[in-house]
Amino acid sequence: MRLTFLPLVLLTACAHAPEPTGPPLSESEKAEAARLLSIAEVDGARMTDEAARRALVRLASQQKCPCPEVEGTLGECVDRKGSCIRAPFAVRAIVRAVDRGEKEGVVSERLLERFGPREPEEIDIREAPCRGPTDAPVTMVVFSDFQCPFCALGAKLTEAVQHAAGDRLRVCFKNWPLTQIHKKAQLAARAAVAAQLQGKFWPMHDRLFSHREELDREDLVDHAEAVGLDVARFKQDLDSDEVLRRVRADVAEADRLQLTGTPTFLINGRRMTDPKTVPDFLDWIAEAIALAKAGASSRPVR
């Protein structure tokens, strides 16, 4: 198993905005940048730097249309109304990346990761704790580790995303304790599953992440009492075969999906690859809804 953390929220490297290079934008470049921003429903006042606009125009002219059945570049197919649902989202991804000052090569790699040929994954959530409407158009599955510092940040981010997305989003949790580097993670995962058996997974989830340095067995018993569990039953379940089976099943699924680090987010089966902020998540959610309405490929969670 490869154990690579995926930094999120604002954990990407700080970067300068594109340096102004080359001559001033030509009238055609100005018009093309304005057209792309308008189609992607991005406020043009957000991108006033000429180098940034030039990068947007250049990237849109170099990237293939993100819908394989549509010929041409991104800049071409985004203008054909309805021909490629994903095209406006690809332009928005470029705008956000250029705003962050990412180099064009990095932007191209991220676009390929997000809009390339990879099919959505099928994920088994039949035993996973979930919150949000069962009929929400978007399901986000989070693979996480209670001892992982980035996962603690991810939990706060997930809460903010769910608040912003409202009834459009259901969030499901899968345990992925990275036991080679987090020695207390599996016991914490078992504690969360034991709490789930009493209908209190999410209070325990929040408690574990807010007390990430307190994950010894005695600490877990204290957490169980704090969230209102039947402590005697909790102690019994903590060491039960059923709880261990559930944790191992989640780990096996993470391995099957070839995940590379915690936390990992999958939105309607698509692995999120962008730097992760609330606007990034909301854009992915909007894209997932658009794809679902169009009947596009989306492997179901089950």
Image: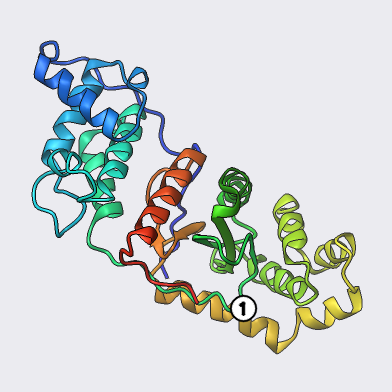
Q: Residue furthest bottom?
A: 241
Q: Please, which colouring scheme is shown? A: rainbow
Instruction: Identify which residue, 283 or 228, lies in the foreground.
Output: 283
**Quadrant of res 257:** bottom left
**Where does the image place residue 145, in percent across and percent down from the top left?**
59, 62
Residue 272 visible? The answer is: no
Point 24% across, 48% down: residue: 82
**Given the image, on which type of amino acid does mark 1 rest?**
Glu
- The quadrant in which the N terminus is found is bottom left
Q: Secondary structure at mark 1?
A: loop
Point 30% across, 30% down: residue: 98
Residue underneath mark 1: 127
On screen, residue 6 above or below 44: below
Would residue 138 appear left or right of 84 to someone viewing this image? right
**Where does the image place residue 39, in percent across and percent down from the top left?**
27, 34
Would residue 57 appear left or right of 252 to someone viewing this image? left
On screen, residue 107 above or below 21: below
**Where does the image place residue 212, in percent across and percent down from the top left?**
71, 54
Instruction: Identify which residue, 277 or 162, lies in the foreground.
Output: 162
Residue 209 visible? The answer is: yes
Point 83% across, 61% down: residue: 223
Tally of numbered discs: 1
Instruction: Identify which residue, 276 or 149, lies in the foreground.
Output: 276
Instruction: Identify which residue, 262 or 110, lies in the foreground.
Output: 110
Q: Residues within 10 Å of mark 1 (few under 14, many from 20)?
A: some
Point 14% across, 14% down: residue: 25
On screen, residue 181 above or below 60: below
